[in-house]
Image: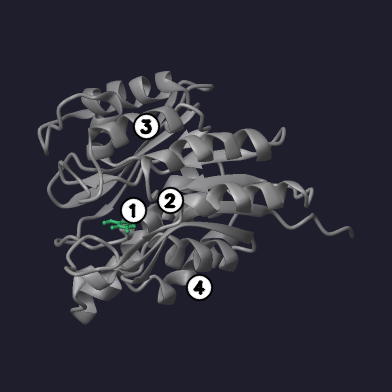
């Protein structure tokens, strides 16, 4: 029996040394799912910027081009390029070029426009950054914003919890009109005890939803855990409706563990002990 070639992802996000988000979650999740994970760090921070004060920030914008130029000499095949938190607006242009340089016929481009939550941009970003993220999102095959990021990408007001199914479906369509064929919005809820994701596939014109129980509290890094698990599922040949479910179950499992342990939410969630469950879900047909 011939073994399929191992898939490779290039993931482009920051290293937050403490706080479990971006590369420190993408790398273990994708690796555990059997995917070779090449990284391009966008910045190095002592912690993420949500909830800690006094963090360090080293911008790696000047390294993006030389790293990419070297990689171009290696003739690597890339099954997916996955971007998350970026260190600067200039990186948005450099990464758009990197998409051009490394996109093969079947390369999936996933943009998680990690820049905002709960109606607010993260401390380092402004509206120009959001507009740049919209241009990058336009070049993706699939994007994974939360509702705040969705409103910034579309430059429409954030509604808080005042929305219904028709707003979500209209938003999914408008985001897809920017360019990506598939859109997943995270943090969607139509009832106070549930939370989940909504997805749209322009090709099939289908909407899918998946909800789990809502665990109260604001847990850092869960958007990055969600996107990483979603990509892990897609690259393990799960269709979009199953992939959103796998990512929801994995993420809520990790949140449940940290909530039960009473961990300070700014340190991130215990996704490590959920990896076994992720692999079981990925192995199921
Ligand atoms: O999880 C998103 C994220 C990633 N990286 C950094 C962050 C955040 C959210 O605050 O600050 C540096």
Q: Distance between the residues labelled 2 and 1?
A: 6 Å
Specify the quadrant of the image occupied by residue 46.
bottom left
Q: CB of residue at label 2: within 8 Å of ligand 1? A: no
SS label for mark 1: helix
Q: Of callouts 3 and 4, which one flags the residue occurring earlier in the amino acid sequence?
A: 3
Dots 3, 4 in contact, CB < 8 A: no
Percent position (x, y) of residue 185? 33, 38
SS label for mark 4: helix
Of circles 3 and 4, which is in front?
3
Instruction: Examine the rendering and report whether any part of residue 206 can be seen.
Output: yes
SS label for mark 3: helix
Residue labelled with disc 1: 223
Q: CB of residue at label 4: within 8 Å of ligand 1? A: no
Q: Residue 276 carries which label?
A: 4
Residue labelled with disc 3: 132
Q: Which mark is residue 246?
A: none
Percent position (x, y) of residue 102? 67, 40
Q: CB of residue at label 1: within 8 Å of ligand 1? A: yes
């Amino acid at each position: 029996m011939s073994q399929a070639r191992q898939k490779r992802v290039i993931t482009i996000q920051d290293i937050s040394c403490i706080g479990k988000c971006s590369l420190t979650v993408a790398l273990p999740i994708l690796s555990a799912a059997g995917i070779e994970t090449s990284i391009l760090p966008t910045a190095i921070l002592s912690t993420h910027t949500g909830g800690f004060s006094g963090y360090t920030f080293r911008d790696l914008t000047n390294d993006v081009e030389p790293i990419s130029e070297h990689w171009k000499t290696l003739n690597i095949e890339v099954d997916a390029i996955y971007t998350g938190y970026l260190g600067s607006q200039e990186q948005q242009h450099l990464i758009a070029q990197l998409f051009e340089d490394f996109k093969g016929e079947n390369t999936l481009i996933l943009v998680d426009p990690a820049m905002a939550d709960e109606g607010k941009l993260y401390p380092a970003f402004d509206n120009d950054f959001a507009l740049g993220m919209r241009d990058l999102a336009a070049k993706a095959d699939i994007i994974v914003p939360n509702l705040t990021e969705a409103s910034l990408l579309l430059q429409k007001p954030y509604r808080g919890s005042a929305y219904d199914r028709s707003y979500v479906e209209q938003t999914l369509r408008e985001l897809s009109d920017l360019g990506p064929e598939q859109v997943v919005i995270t943090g969607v809820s139509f009832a106070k005890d549930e939370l989940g994701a909504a997805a749209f596939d322009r090709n099939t014109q289908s909407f899918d939803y998946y909800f789990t129980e809502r665990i109260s509290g604001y847990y850092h890094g869960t958007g990055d855990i969600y996107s990483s698990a979603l990509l892990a599922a897609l690259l393990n040949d799960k269709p979009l409706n199953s992939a959103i479910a796998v990512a929801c179950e994995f993420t809520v499992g990790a949140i449940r563990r940290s909530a039960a342990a009473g961990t300070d939410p700014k340190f991130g969630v215990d996704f490590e002990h959920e990896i076994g469950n992720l692999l079981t879900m990925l192995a199921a047909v």
